[in-house]
Image: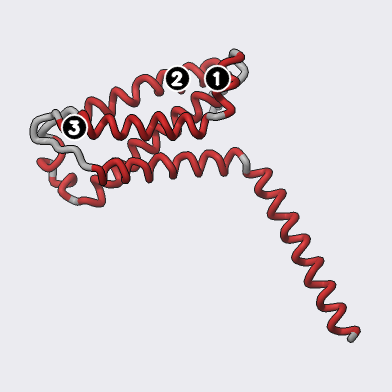
Amino acid sequence: MARIKFDHRLRTILICSLIVVWPLVICILSAQSTWTRSQWWMKINLVRDLAHVGVFFVLAAVIWLGLKCGQGLSAWLTKLARHRTWIAFSFSFLYAVGDEIHQYFVPKRYANVMDVGIDTVGILLALVILVVWERRDRIRFVGQKIASFTLQYLKQTRFNQTSA
């Protein structure tokens, strides 16, 4: 089975196109007036809430990854990429607020502040996973240092107790 190798440019184009397309998908889904409660599966609050979390999880992840892929392409993108977590959070959160305002004007839909909170859970979940994944080697190194220090401390305490 042949493995497809993505080069950096293709990956950047794919992610940047998702940055444009995904908010449009959210807008189209929230503009449908008959979608929310007419389907049986949307009557289950857990499914509806997970849909909110998933949609904004993807939005925050795509923005974060797009800024990371753009790093090194130009000087201003490199500067933006340093703050990609805050930019991804801010844009995604503002889009969630804007989406609820948009739903207020759609017939048979309503704006709900609770939905913005649920969207924020998806945003934060995506960003925490991406930041931890990016820093996993650093986190592993700190964990090893803490474990080494703890073992050394326990050996010293045990030695001091046996010699006394």
Determine whether the residue tagged by mark 2 lies in a helix, strand or loop: helix
First-in-chain label (1 vs 3): 1
Question: Quarter of the image holding residue 107?
Answer: top left
Judge depth for marks 2 and 3 and give the one in front: 3
Residue 16 is marked as 2
**Residue 33, position in %: x, y?**
12, 32
Q: Amino acid at mark 2?
A: Cys
- Which residue, given by chain and number where applicable, does mark 3 sit on? 103
**Residue 62, position in %: x, y?**
44, 29
Q: Nearer the viewer, residue 24 or 153?
A: 153
Q: Amino acid at mark 3?
A: Gln
Q: Is residue 70 shown above or below 152? A: above
Residue 146 is marked as none
First-in-chain label (1 vs 2): 2
Q: How many marks?
A: 3
Rate crowding at label 3 as few (under 14), some (14 to 19) or many (20 or more) other CA atoms within 10 Å: many
